Amino acid sequence: MNEPLKDVDIRRAAGDRLLHKARNCSDTLIVDELGLRHGACRVDVAVINGHFRGIEIKSDVDNLTRLPRQVVHYGEVMDRATLIVTERHIDAATELLPAWWGIIAASRAKSGVVKFSRIRADRINRHTSPLMVARLLWRSEAADLLRQFGYAERDIRGSREVLYTMLTREMPKTSLAKVVRTTLKARKHWRDR
């Protein structure tokens, strides 16, 4: 009997094969464990380029208990999302996912190599929340953006939540998402790296 597929096995194989092109693109940032809602939820692998793309991994040793909540949080920020899931969870996971989520089955070949097969392609999510996208920024980044809009220092002394709300009022949803992606890609130091 094959050894159960674990997150680390799937993540390594996905990085080597599914994300190879993205890793070699200068305009793409890949972030492991990107926090959403200030860390209340984590995207296993976030690919940030012209879109926010989230990849959630459910291995043989995982359960699907958190998946419904993760689907909601991903839906607030991610333009596209894919679940990489072992055969053990495919049927139950498919029932929990909205139609815009892609599904990739992960299994172990007889040789021991992790193999992938696309069950369903991802589609664009048109229901992201500008406020939740803005929350990907650090407070200092949000303040810098507001300064670019001409806000005085006294106007940007509020909490980060106030600053995020101000940003959502300054820019249309697509422009805000683009600015947030650009800011994240330019970020030199991530707190948890």
Image: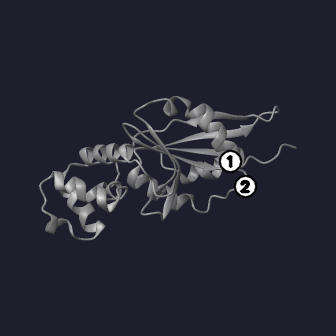
Q: Nearer the viewer, mark 1 or mark 2?
A: 1
Look at 35% across and 59% down and name the residue there. 138
Look at 44% across and 38% down and name the residue there. 123
Q: Position of residue 184 (x, y in %)?
A: 37, 47
Mark 1 highlights which residue?
A: 8
Q: Nearer the viewer, residue 53 or 164?
A: 164
Separation of residues labelled 1 and 2 (CA atoms):
11 Å
Label 1's element? Answer: helix
Q: Amino acid at mark 1?
A: Val
Q: Earlier in the sequence, mark 1 or mark 2?
A: 1
Mark 2 highlights which residue?
A: 61
- Residue 178 falls in which quadrant of the image? top left
Q: Amino acid at mark 2?
A: Val
Label 2's element? Answer: loop
Q: Nearer the viewer, residue 15 or 106?
A: 15
Q: Position of residue 73 (x, y in %)?
A: 45, 58
Q: Nearer the viewer, residue 76 or 151?
A: 151
Left or right of 148 on screen, residue 125: right
Residue 168 seen in render:
no
